[in-house]
Structures are given as C-alpha cells and as structure tokens.
C-alpha cells in the first residue's frame, strides 16, 4: 500500500477502531447477539483489530492471524457476522482516508479502494478458509463415524451373528453392508446370520433387491440368512410390490428369528432351574386329573 | 492341468488350487463324473477357497456338475467360496440355486453327512 495512505490509517487507527466498534454494536451485532456474550465479542474484536493493524505495518503476521482465526472458528461464531464485520471495517477505513485527504479525483479514490482491499481481503480469505477447512474436517469425520455405524456385525453366539440395520439403505450402503456381512461371516465362522431391519424406515423394491442379493451371497459362502424385524407395514409393501422373499426364512422379530437360528444350528434354550419345570409339570398333571 | 480328485471312504474331495479356465473346468467335469462312476461315491465336496475368479461360464459348468452328479446319485457341496467371488456371482445374476454350500471343508462334510442320512 501507498506509504502515505498507510500513515493516515495508522494515525487514525484509534478513531477507526472506535467507529467500527460502534458500528458493530449498533447494527450488525443484533442478529447474532444471542449466540455470543458481549464481553467476548469486545475482546475478540480488539484482538482482531490488533492483528489487522500489525498486518498493515508488517507483512509477516500470519502466525498471529492463524491463531486468531483458529480461536474464532473454535468459538463457533457465525460466518455471516465475520463477513459483515469485515465489510463494515473496510468501508470505515476507506471513508476515513477520504475524509482526511481532501482530494476529489477519481483516480485517488480507486487507489484508496485498491489499497484497503489488498490489505483487508487476505485476512478475510484466511478466516473464511479456516472456516471451510474446519467444516470439511467435521464432515469427513462424521462420514467415517457414519460408516462405522452403518453396518455393524455382532456375534451373539457361536455360529450365530446379528446385523442390525438402522436408517435408509442406498446403493453405496448396500454394498458396504454386503461386504461387511460376507467378511463377518467368514471371520466369525457363522452358520446363521440374522439381518434385523426393524430400524429401516422404508423397504422399497431397491432395498428389497439389495437384501435379497446379500442373502444370496451369504448362501453362496455357505451360511444361512434370516431376515428379521419385518413390521406389518413392511410386510404389506413387500407383498404389494410383488417382491419374492420366499427363498430365505423371514421372521417378525429378532427373538423369533433367534429361535429359528437355534433350530437351524440344532440347539435350544433350556431352563437351568429344574424347580420351575417340576412345578409346571405338577400343575399340568393336576389339571389332567381334574 | 488337471484337478486332483481324492477319495475318502464314500466321499470325494476336490480342492481347486488353480485358477479355473474353461478348458480345466470342462476337464474337471468329465473327470469328476468318471470318478463318481468308478468309485460309486455318494458325496462330493468341492473346496473353492483359493479360487479368486469365477466367471459366468465356470459358474454354469459348476452348476451343471452338481445336476449331473445328482443324476448319478452323488450329492455335491461347494465350500469356501470367497466373499468377493460370491459378490461377483450375485452381481452377474448367477444364483446357483441348486447348489449346496458350506463355510469350509469341515462344515461341508458335516452337511453332506446330514443330507445323506436324511435320505
């Protein structure tokens, strides 16, 4: 920037800051006030002003700027507040310079504009970049978390595993489900896999197709698939859509599916308390007598 | 290259250790049927653990072997089909409806025994 302009800005820095703070307080802040406390705003604004003025004298202040932007991102301020604040800061600076230097020509005005823009914009860009990087990070983290949650396989007993599905199933997820299912069957040496669709809100032809494919694939690697958690409305849609699920067993609840799985693996649940069994036997025999 | 077919009591064990091409698959079909004929075996376990690729032709040949062996009175169980292979087959629309499968050789033998006892 032109040294002359720079000096003007530096000389009037206190006034500019005061004007800016007032401006923010009067107009821009109101919308965001509920999100942040006033003291904090004041404090961060001061910090920001310090950084931006030191940027004016010294080009190499990127470190403190980085720290500041990181702080602002962590505070979670709305981006709109930042951009509005920067804009008002810019216009106040331009106005100040033009007031100080009483020249009326076109070229001078352009020079001031360019100078201030070149000064403020990099800072603004830095802040916005920080924000978007932060968002991208969050999104990718959530994606990973979602993927981990999307197709869990739980070995409940030797030879029996359960895959509870929650949420909508699309093609990508169906692929992931199938991969996890097959790898899990091999890993846990499962004889029977229960796919629980209690948490799947809608079963249309596509979802049914994916489930059938998964079940067929499971059969090919040598295990049996049982579809459980079929709610009444899902049974209705499946029949109305003409989907054929007769190739593998289906059950209404995980409980009944598990009983079926035990039956398939030739096991059963017995009570360890013989007393209860005796009592029931006695009851039955006494009823028979009567 | 021929695939060795081993006899264990009245079962035949086949472990496919090479990638199947069309020629080998046809040869295998012929060999297996001959072996069933000569030994009078009642059950066959075909282990596909080390097979990475099964295309539609091989799948058809394998499916045919099952039907043919059945005609000759021998039950066939395929074991150890890899997840990737199974996914590819399903994607190709090959469901191998008439084929019995098991997780590994051990499970395959158990399954075969059960099936033969049921009859």
Image (cartoon, grey):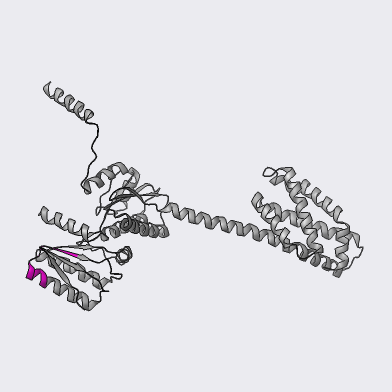
| Quadrant assignment for the C terminus of chain A | top left
Q: Is residue A45 left or right of residue A255?
A: right
Is residue A209 in view from this perspective?
Answer: no
Q: Residue furthest right?
A: A102
Q: Residue furthest top?
A: A290
Splitting the image into 4 quarters, where does residue A67 fall?
bottom right
Residue A174 location (% of width, % of height)? 38, 58
| Quadrant assignment for the N terminus of chain A | bottom right
Above or below, A248 against A290 in this view is below
* Magenta highlight on residue B42: yes
Residue A51 location (% of width, % of height)? 77, 57
Q: How many marks?
A: 0
Above or below, A198 against A112 in this view is above
Above or below, B63 against A30 in this view is below
Kindly identify the residue that appears in the image at 47 percent across and 53 percent down: A146
Residue A83 location (% of width, % of height)? 71, 56
Kindly identify the residue that appears in the image at 80 percent across and 52 percent down: A20
Kindly identify the residue that appears in the image at 28 percent across and 59 percent down: A216
Q: Is residue A202 left or right of residue A245?
A: right
Splitting the image into 4 quarters, where does residue B90 fall?
bottom left
Q: Is residue B88 left or right of residue A167?
A: left
* Magenta highlight on residue A138: no
Residue A229 location (% of width, % of height)? 33, 45
Q: Is residue A189 left or right of residue A18?
A: left
The magenta region covers B34-45
Is residue A99 in view from this perspective?
Answer: yes
């Amino acid at each position: 920037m032109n040294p002359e302009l720079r000096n003007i800005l530096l000389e009037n820095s206190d006034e500019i800051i005061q004007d800016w703070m007032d401006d923010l307080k009067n107009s821009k802040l109101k919308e965001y006030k509920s999100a942040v406390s006033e003291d904090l705003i004041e404090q961060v604004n001061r910090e920001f002003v310090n950084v931006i003025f030191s940027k004016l004298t010294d080009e190499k202040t990127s470190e403190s700027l980085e720290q500041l932007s990181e702080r602002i991102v962590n505070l979670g301020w709305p981006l709109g507040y930042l951009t509005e604040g920067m804009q008002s800061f810019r216009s106040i600076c331009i106005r100040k310079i033009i007031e100080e230097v009483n020249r009326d020509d076109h070229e001078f005005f352009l020079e001031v504009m360019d100078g201030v823009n070149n000064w403020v914009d990099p800072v603004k860009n830095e802040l916005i970049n920080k924000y978007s990087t932060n968002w991208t990070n969050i999104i990718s983290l959530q994606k990973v978390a979602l993927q981990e949650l999307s197709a869990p396989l739980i070995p409940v007993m030797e030879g029996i595993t359960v895959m509870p599905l929650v949420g909508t199933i699309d093609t990508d997820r169906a692929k992931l489900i199938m991969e996890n299912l097959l790898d899990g069957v091999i890993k846990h040496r499962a004889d029977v896999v229960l796919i629980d669709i209690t948490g799947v809100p809608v079963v249309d032809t596509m979802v049914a197709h994916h489930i059938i494919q998964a079940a067929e694939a499971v059969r090919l690697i040598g295990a049996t698939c049982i579809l459980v958690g079929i709610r009444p409305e899902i049974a209705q849609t499946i029949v109305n859509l003409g989907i054929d699920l007769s190739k593998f067993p289906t059950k209404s609840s995980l409980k009944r599916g598990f009983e079926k799985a035990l039956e398939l693996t030739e096991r059963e649940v017995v009570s360890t308390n013989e007393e209860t069994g005796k009592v029931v036997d006695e009851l039955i025999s006494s009823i028979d007598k009567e | 290259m021929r695939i060795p077919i081993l006899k264990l009591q009245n079962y035949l064990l086949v472990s496919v250790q090479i990638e199947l091409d069309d020629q080998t698959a046809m040869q295998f079909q012929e060999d297996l049927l001959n072996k069933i004929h000569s030994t009078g075996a009642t059950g066959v376990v075909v282990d596909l653990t080390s097979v990475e690729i099964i295309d539609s032709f091989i799948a058809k040949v394998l499916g045919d072997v099952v039907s043919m062996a059945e005609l000759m009175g021998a039950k066939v169980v395929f074991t150890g089909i890899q997840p990737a292979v199974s996914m590819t087959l399903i994607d190709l629309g090959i469901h191998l409806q008439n084929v019995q499968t098991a997780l590994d050789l051990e499970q395959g033998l158990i399954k075969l025994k059960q099936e033969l006892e049921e009859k």
